[in-house]
Structure formats: structure tokens, C-alpha cells
């Protein structure tokens, strides 16, 4: 290991020796003075140039692992992984990699290592235990229940081995963070214990016992390569493992963009030679034996995109490597369309965003949580001069959080429409023509004061969203991704007719069920239409239905005629346009219908549980037809047509 000087900026002139250690001004009478003297003497920790050791100062993961690496001379990592927050070349980088490779510690699933996090007593035990190979024993601390399940065995080994002791009151205090004096004391004891116990390495053991034959590994046991793929919120994860351990070489290739992992000493491939992935930006994974040498396998990971994607490699146990491709935006294009700027985004996962105005120079910032950027877009920017937009710039200021900054001198509005299950999005940026009286979720455009719906306020409510996907079709189409484009398309047409349209959501959010009707009440809307897709266990059932609620004898009952009329014109126009089975107008006590002050209806456009109608609902043309039918019904209701 490279020998690293701890506390780099502060330890310029100190030469480590015991006399100095004993002479630290802040160590007089310290319980740990002898251990600190030995530690400074052997060089795995230093004091500060002002003559202090600062024994009570806390210790971060980066600091503790650097001390452990220097004290135990860990083997260098053979397949160093990439952590988002461990910059290449940073002073603790090789120690962190060596500790991960030796199995002392691991990173977090979000590809961070969190080097600045403080080390607790139970974490320190887990880091040191694998180095000592001690025996488990019964834990005698009075606060055993507070020791985390993952730490119990390590704490027990170190306690039985006398490396750690509890407090005089019988507690261990597992979650208490350690300071420099405690870190040195525990490492000092661990070092001493290791010198005494010394477990022979496996191959030395074999030599010292020539009479004992290690059984020949069975055919297929060694060099067996397995490849697997899985996914979660952090992206698509490809895991490669070889039974006997391996050194991987990852190469990035072009045309088409792909990763090739070369694995030596492979005798058998356990998994299918070709795995079709077809999601999360991955096309397929192909394993083959290369021509470069006997027993060398190549695992080719093909991207489904025309450009290389961002990926992270994480070392696991020796012999394992995982490659994660996080959700990311990989293509952006902008084009002027009449009075707005259309910005098209392509991503490997569903896109959703939040907007905020940030000042000086003023910009509208769209934040995409859970989505990063491909390598080619990390510094993308483009000057434009359309619809009040002066420039566009992409960045990824936080882990897996892309931002699109829209430079402007104007007040802008942004609306959007998505397709391909949310992986393609078109943003419409334009000058805000009516800055006053706009709620955050309302948008206005189109020729105001003209058109058949001038002066009318219409609230459209795309069902579900965010953490609520709604009903899910047999092929995985989620209701929330169907209701949103229908509502956005309907809003576009209504605005062209001069209406003031307010949407309860414009992205993948889930406004409260009460907030939806309240938005309509607060804006004195003339009509409220909630858009849904139906679900039933019997997947052969299909059709269109419209719901209303106006029980006679209640305040809502006074709107009974109007509400029934709204529901029936919507139902008529949907059935006429879409041609699906007519399930009729149904009365039901839905929150959005009960809590709206104005005529309101809820349309179930089709059955997402029916595989054929699921496909229709996911089709942009069908969505457009549904949108125009809803607009036609609303227009007939409002204009008496
Ligand atoms: Zn629904």
C-alpha cells in the first residue's frame, strides 16, 4: 500500500517518534498515552503541528480505514470500484478500495461510500474482526439489544478476544462514535493480538502439512462464471462472479456503445450465453470465450441507446464485480414550435421533474430526482433565443439528480407531455402571459379571450401519480402514465379554444385526494373532470364508463341535472370516438366528485386490466382520441352544444 500521511495539511513537519507522542501537550495523564505513543511510532497516525494529538476528536470512515490500511498493510484492490464520493487520487482512496476489497467494509447501494461519516463502536468492530479471525462467544454486555444484527458476531469476536471492552456500567454503547484515542487503542490491541495469534495463510498451511492433500476441485467448480441482471431504483445491475476469484478488466467500446468485461481463468459459463435485458438502457448481455487466450471469457454488455451510458463498477467479494447503470437522460434536443420552445428528452427510466425559479441570473430550473446524465450530457449546454429562453444547460449537481437550467429574462411557464412509459418527454417552455393569478399548477396559453371556451375555467385531474401508480395492466402499463398524457393532450386542445385550464398535476406527482377538488374550488372552475382507467379481475372485460355523484336532497343534489348531463355527454362522446363497449353512466361516491363545488365527472376511459385495451391506453393516438372526446364532451356541456 502507498504510505499515506494522515491529516495531510496539518502534519507537514512532524516526524513520528515516541518521545514526541509522549510529549503531546494534550496527552498528559491520558489513559491511551502508551497506545498513542506506539501508534505514532509505527506511523499509522500522526499528531498535529501545534503539538497536540486531539485525542477527543472524532474519526471518519476515511480516516479510520486509512489508519487500518497503514497499520495492517492491506492488499491493494485488484478490481477497484467507483464510488461517487471517492474522487480518484484522493488521499484516502486507495485505503478505502483496499478495505472494500479485503471485505472489511462496503459502500452504500447508491454508489456512495460516505467517507466523511463518523465511525461508531460497532462499525469499528466490523472493520477489524475480519482481520483477526477470532472465535465468537456469548456477549455479556447489558445493552446487547442495541447492537445491530450485522455487528453482533464482530462485536462478540472482539470482546471474547479482549480487543474491546465495555464500560464500567456493563454497557457496550454500540452506536457511540469513536474518537482518535479510542481508534488508536482498538487498532493497537488488534495489532498486538494478530502478532500473537498469527493465522497461517492457506497456501503456507499446505506447504507445512505436505502429508495432507487438498482435494482436487471438482470439474466445473473452479473458474465457473455466472452472470446475472436485476434492477431497483438505483438502476440496472449486472453481476459477474467467478467461483475461484478473478481479476476483471472493463473496457468501453463504441459502434455500437458497449462494455466488455474480460475475465481470465474461466472454464465454464453457468448462465445463458445471451441474456435479453431490454430495459433500463441495456439491450443484452452476451458471454463468449475470446480469441485472446485459452480460458478468457468476455462478457459484453450492450447499451440499448445510441450513446455510451454512465455506469458504476462495485467490487463485491473477491471474484465478484457488479456494474450498475443508473436511470439517466441520454439525449436532448430543442426546437422552436410557434410561440414556444419544445425540448425533447430521452431517458433510460421514467422521467418526472419539479420546477423552481432561481435568481441572478434568473433561471427556471427543472430537477429530475432519481435520474442522472449520460457521460456525453454532463456538460451539455446550448444557447437559444426563442420564446424568452436565452440558453439551456444540463448538470448533475447531486447523485442521480439531473437538472435542466433554462436561462431567461422572462417569467416562463413549463408544461410537458411524456410517452414511452415516461422515458420520453417533451417540455414546452414559453413566456408566462398571465403571471398574476396563476397558481403553481395552472398553466395558460392560447388565444385568450377568443375561442368558444373563452372565460371558462376547466380543471382536469389526471388520476394517481407519484407513489400511486393506480391500476397496473397485465403487461405492466401503469394507470398514472396513461391518465397524464390524456389530460395533457386534452388541456392543449382546450387552451386552443381559449379556456383557462388547470391541471391537478403535470408530472409524476400524487396530489392529495382532497387537494384535487380544492384546487378546482379555489379557482372557481366551471367544470372538473377526473381521468382514470378501469380495472377488473376478469381480463376479458373492457369498455368505457363515466361516474358522477349528486344524491338528491343534498347540496350536491341541486346540481343533479347538470352533473348527469356532464357525465352523459362525456360518455356519449367517448363511446362514439373510441368505439369501446358502453358501460354507461354510473353514480358513485368518489372523493373528487363529492368534494367539488362545480359539476364534476370521472371518466374511466378503458379497462387497463384487459390486455388489448391496456395496449390502446398506452398508445399515443388512442390517448389523443380520448383527449379530443373529453374536450368535445366538456365543450358541449359548457356551450350547450
Ligand atoms: Zn384510477
Image (spheres, rainbow, N blue to C red):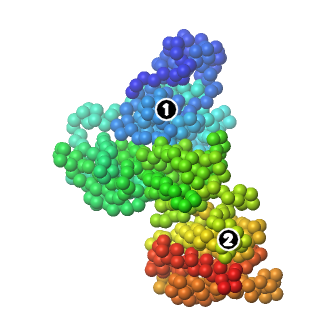
From the viewer's perspective, tell me whether residue 596 is left or right of residue 401: right
Is 11 drawn above or below residue 62 in the view shown?
A: above
Q: Residue at x 48, y 42 (%)?
A: 379
Is 564 drawn above or below residue 85 in the view shown?
A: below
Q: Is residue 505 visible?
A: no
Q: Position of residue 28 (x, y in %)?
A: 64, 15
- What residue is pinned by disc 2? 450
Q: Count the numbered circles shown.
A: 2
Q: Is residue 529 visible?
A: yes
Q: Residue at x 52, y 64 (%)?
A: 418
Marks 1/2 in contact by CB < 8 Å: the verdict is no
Q: Secondary structure at mark 2?
A: loop
Quadrant in the rendering for residue 535: bottom right
| 547 or 380: nearer the viewer | 380
| 257 or 29: nearer the viewer | 257
Q: Secondary structure at mark 1?
A: helix
Which quarter of the rendered picture does the N terminus lie within? Answer: top left
CA distance for labels 1 and 2 = 70 Å
- What residue is pinned by disc 1? 65
Amino acid at each position: 500500500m502507498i504510505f499515506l500521511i494522515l491529516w495531510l495539511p496539518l502534519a507537514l513537519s512532524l516526524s513520528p517518534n515516541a518521545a514526541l507522542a509522549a510529549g503531546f501537550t494534550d496527552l498528559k495523564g491520558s489513559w491511551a498515552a502508551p497506545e498513542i505513543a506506539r501508534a505514532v511510532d509505527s506511523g499509522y497516525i500522526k499528531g498535529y503541528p501545534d503539538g497536540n494529538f486531539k485525542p477527543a476528536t472524532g474519526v471518519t470512515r476515511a480516516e479510520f480505514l486509512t489508519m487500518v490500511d497503514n497499520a495492517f498493510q492491506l492488499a491493494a484492490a485488484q478490481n477497484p470500484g467507483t464510488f461517487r464520493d471517492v474522487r480518484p487520487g484522493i488521499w484516502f482512496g486507495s485505503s478505502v478500495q483496499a478495505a472494500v476489497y479485503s471485505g472489511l467494509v462496503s459502500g452504500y447501494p447508491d454508489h456512495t461510500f460516505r467517507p466523511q461519516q463518523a465511525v461508531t463502536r460497532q462499525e469499528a468492530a466490523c472493520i477489524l474482526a475480519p482481520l483477526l479471525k477470532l472465535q465468537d462467544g456469548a456477549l455479556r454486555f447489558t445493552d446487547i439489544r442495541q447492537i445491530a444484527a450485522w455487528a453482533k458476531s464482530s462485536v462478540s469476536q472482539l470482546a471474547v478476544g479482549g480487543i474491546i471492552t465495555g464500560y464500567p456500567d456493563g454497557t457496550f454503547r454500540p452506536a457511540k462514535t469513536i474518537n482518535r484515542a479510542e481508534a488508536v487503542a482498538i487498532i493497537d490491541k488488534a495489532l498486538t493480538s494478530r502478532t500473537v495469534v498469527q493465522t497461517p495463510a492457506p497456501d503456507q498451511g499446505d506447504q507445512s502439512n505436505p502429508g495432507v492433500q487438498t482435494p482436487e476441485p471438482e470439474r466445473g467448480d473452479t473458474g465457473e462464471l455466472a452472470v446475472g441482471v436485476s434492477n431497483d431504483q438505483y438502476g440496472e445491475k449486472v453481476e459477474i462472479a467467478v467461483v475461484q476469484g478473478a481479476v476483471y478488466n472493463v473496457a468501453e467500446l463504441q459502434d455500437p456503445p458497449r462494455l466488455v468485461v474480460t475475465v481470465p481463468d474461466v472454464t465454464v459459463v453457468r448462465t445463458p450465453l445471451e441474456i435479453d435485458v431490454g430495459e433500463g438502457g441495456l439491450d443484452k448481455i452476451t458471454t463468449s470465450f475470446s480469441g485472446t487466450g485459452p480460458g478468457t471469457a468476455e462478457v459484453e454488455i450492450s447499451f440499448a441507446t445510441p450513446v455510451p451510458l454512465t455506469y458504476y463498477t462495485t467490487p463485491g467479494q473477491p471474484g465478484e464485480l457488479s456494474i450498475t447503470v443508473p436511470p439517466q437522460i441520454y439525449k436532448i434536443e430543442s426546437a422552436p414550435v410557434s410561440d414556444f420552445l419544445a425540448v425533447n428528452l430521452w431517458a433510460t427510466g421514467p422521467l418526472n421533474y419539479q420546477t423552481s425559479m432561481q435568481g441572478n441570473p434568473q433561471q427556471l430550473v427543472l430537477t429530475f430526482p432519481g435520474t442522472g446524465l449520460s457521460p456525453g450530457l454532463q456538460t451539455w449546454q446550448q444557447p437559444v433565443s426563442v420564446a424568452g429562453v436565452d440558453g439551456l444547460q444540463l448538470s448533475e449537481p447531486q447523485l442521480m439528480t439531473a437538472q435542466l437550467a433554462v436561462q431567461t429574462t422572462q417569467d416562463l411557464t413549463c408544461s410537458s407531455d411524456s410517452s414511452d412509459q415516461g422515458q420520453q418527454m417533451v417540455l414546452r417552455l414559453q413566456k408566462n402571459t398571465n403571471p398574476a393569478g396563476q397558481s403553481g399548477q395552472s398553466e395558460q396559453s392560447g388565444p385568450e379571450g377568443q375561442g368558444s371556451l373563452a372565460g371558462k375555467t376547466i380543471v382536469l385531474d389526471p388520476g394517481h401519480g407519484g407513489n400511486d401508480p393506480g391500476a397496473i395492466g397485465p403487461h405492466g402499463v401503469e394507470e398514472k402514465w396513461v391518465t397524464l398524457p390524456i389530460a395533457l393532450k386534452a388541456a392543449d386542445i382546450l387552451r386552443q379554444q381559449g379556456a383557462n385550464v388547470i391541471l391537478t398535476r403535470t408530472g409524476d406527482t400524487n396530489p392529495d385526494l382532497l387537494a384535487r377538488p380544492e384546487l378546482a374550488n379555489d379557482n372557481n372552475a366551471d367544470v372538473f373532470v377526473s381521468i382514470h382507467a378501469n380495472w377488473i379481475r376478469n381480463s376479458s372485460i373492457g369498455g368505457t364508463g363515466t361516474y358522477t355523484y349528486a344524491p338528491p336532497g343534498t347540496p350536491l343534489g341541486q346540481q343533479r341535472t347538470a352533473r348527469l348531463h356532464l357525465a352523459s355527454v362525456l360518455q356519449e362522446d367517448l363511446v362514439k370516438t373510441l368505439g369501446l363497449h358502453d358501460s354507461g353512466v354510473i353514480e358513485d361516491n368518489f372523493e373528487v366528485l363529492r368534494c367539488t363545488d362545480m359539476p364534476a365527472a370521472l371518466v374511466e376511459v378503458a379497462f387497463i386490466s384487459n390486455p388489448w385495451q391496456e395496449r390502446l391506453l398506452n398508445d399515443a393516438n388512442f390517448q389523443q382520441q380520448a383527449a379530443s372526446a373529453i374536450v368535445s364532451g366538456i365543450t358541449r356541456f359548457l356551450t350547450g352544444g
